[in-house]
Structure formats: C-alpha cells, structure tokens
Amino acid sequence: PLRRQRQMCIRDREGIIAKVRRILLSNPGHFPPVDVVASHLATSTRTLSRSLQDVGTSYQRILDEVRKEMAIEYLRNSNLPIEEIAALVGYSDPSNFRKAFRRWTQNAPSYYREER
C-alpha cells in the first residue's frame, strides 16, 4: 500500500506541470504570477514551488517553455512583426524578448521566420 501511495503521489505531481501549463495557456499573453497560479490550484505558492521542484522544474521554467513554444509558433505561422509577437508572449520590450528568445533557443527570432 505504501508503494502504491508513493506512485500515485509522483503521478499527481507530474500532472502539476500540465495543470500549470493549462493555466498559463488559458489567457495567452497575460501570464499570471506564480501566486495567482497557486491559488487557481488551491495551494500555496510555497507548496506549488516545492511540487514543481520535486519534478525537476520551476514556475519560471514552465513559463519560459510556454512563451518559447508560442513565439516559435507565431514566427513560423504568421507574418506578425517581432514587436507584436513579443507582446503576445508577455514582453513589453522587444529587445528583452529577443534576448530571452536567444537564451531559450540559441537562435535569433529571424532564424525561425526564415526557416519557413
């Protein structure tokens, strides 16, 4: 019984990433801070952070991953200007978006646009 409990616990925690992603994607471009996400999940910020740490990630990592996926999607499938894509993924300053994008992908946003 103890082993089964532990397995369920791990499975529940792995689901936490999907739950956080779902909340982040529910209103694209307006990403809630970690405390708001925690309250959506009826938990404390500290417990959410610990649960994410237990599965080897963090709120910031999940947020960056969501932003990166959205940005790549916009770059590949639209002709929106970089400034607009930056705003759509939650950056008010396009140069901060470009820096973050390079950090995420090791490439400039234009790389994904030209790939089409």
Image: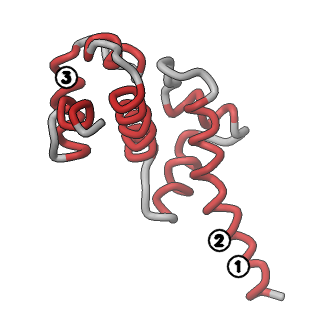
**Which of 80 and 46 lies nearest the eye of the viewer?**
80
Instruction: Tell me whether the residue at label 3 lies in contact with that at label 1, contact meaning CB atoms closer than 8 angstroms.
Output: no
Would residue 66 appear left or right of 115 to someone viewing this image? right
Crowdedness near tag 3: few (<14), some (14–19) or many (≥20) residues, C-alpha within 10 Å? few
Where does label 1 land, which residue? 6
Residue beneath disc 3? 96
Crowd band around label 2 with a 10 angstrom C-alpha radius: few (<14), some (14–19), many (20+): some
User: Which class describes the residues within 10 Å of circle 1: few (<14), some (14-19), or many (20+)?
Assistant: few
Comparing 86 with 58, the one in front is: 86
Location of the C terminus by quadrant is: top left
Query: Depth-wise, is mark 3 or mark 1 nearer the camera?
Result: 3
Residue 103: percent from left, percent from top: 19, 42
Which mark, by number, is residue 115? Answer: none
* Element type where label 1 sits in the image: helix
Looking at the picture, how far across and down is residue 106, in whole percent? 16, 46
Q: Which image quadrant is residue 63 in?
A: top left
Residue 10 disc label: 2
Position of 112 relative to 7 (above/below): above
- Position of 116 relative to 1 (above/below): above
Question: What amino acid is found at the position of numbered circle 3 in the picture?
Answer: Asn
Question: Residue at horizontal 62%, vertical 50%?
Answer: 18
Which residue type does callout 1 highlight?
A: Arg
The foreground one among 10 and 84 is 84
Give the mark, 3 or 1, whose residue is nearer the N terminus.
1
Circles 3 and 2, Cβ within 8 Å, touching? The answer is no
Marks 2 and 1, how far apart in space? 6 Å
**What is the distance, in whole Å, between disc 3 and disc 1 at their CAs?**
42 Å
Q: The residue tagged with tag 2: helix, strand or loop?
A: helix
Residue located at (59% from left, 21% from top): 27
